[in-house]
Image (cartoon, rainbow, N blue to C red):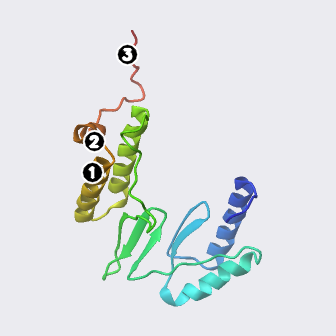
Amino acid sequence: MGSHIPGLVVELVLQELEKLALTQQPSIFWRRYVDDTFFIVKRNMLQHFHEHLNSIFPEIKCTREDEKEQQIPFLDVLVKQKPKGEIKMKVYWKATNTTKILSFYKNNPVVNERSCVRTFFKRVHVHCSIPEEKASEARYLHNQFMRNGYLKAFISRCLCVRPQRTQNETPLRI
């Protein structure tokens, strides 16, 4: 939004906007993160719904990005519509992506490097709904980490699934 208004006020206004918009014009699907919104409406209702959103609070103008080639990015997800109407997703990399990841050669705490590996690979598992694309994205990430100095063994250790403690389990004390 580019505003200096505190986040809480912005959140309250956007919640009110959503409430008013969706009670008068229900959409098929609606998700919002801060001021980025992804919604699905029938194609013939899109222009009307956009005008409706902009009429609720005239001071707030909502912009819109239409799908191109049956796909549209939302945050770090690329949402694709398949021929039979089903929705598939994959990780979205912006055109400005430099493929630079936290360098393993720099003097970074190992916990940050480990977190970097886990976070990027978690995106793949959460956002990719097509197995082939999940495998392709994992290979891409593996190559990017290797280019940034990460050792193969380090990447593998970061991705090992560790058993998690249950809530009732107490940690060992020495």
Distance of mark 1 from mark 2, alpha carbons?
Answer: 8 Å
Which residue: 38% across, 54% down?
A: 123
Judge left or right: residue 84 versus residue 49. left
- SS state under label 2: helix
Which x, y percent locates residue 9?
74, 57
Q: Residue 66 at what x, y percent from top left?
A: 50, 81
Asked which quadrant contains residue 161, the reply is: top left
Discs 1, 2 touching: Cβ within 8 Å: yes
Disc 1/disc 3 C-alpha distance (Å): 35 Å
Of 98 and 16, the residue lying toward us: 98
15 above or below 63?
A: above
- State the residue position of label 1: 142
Q: Amino acid at mark 3?
A: Leu
What's the CA distance linking mark 2 and mark 3? 28 Å
Reading the image, the residue beneath label 2 is 155
Residue 172's disc number? 3
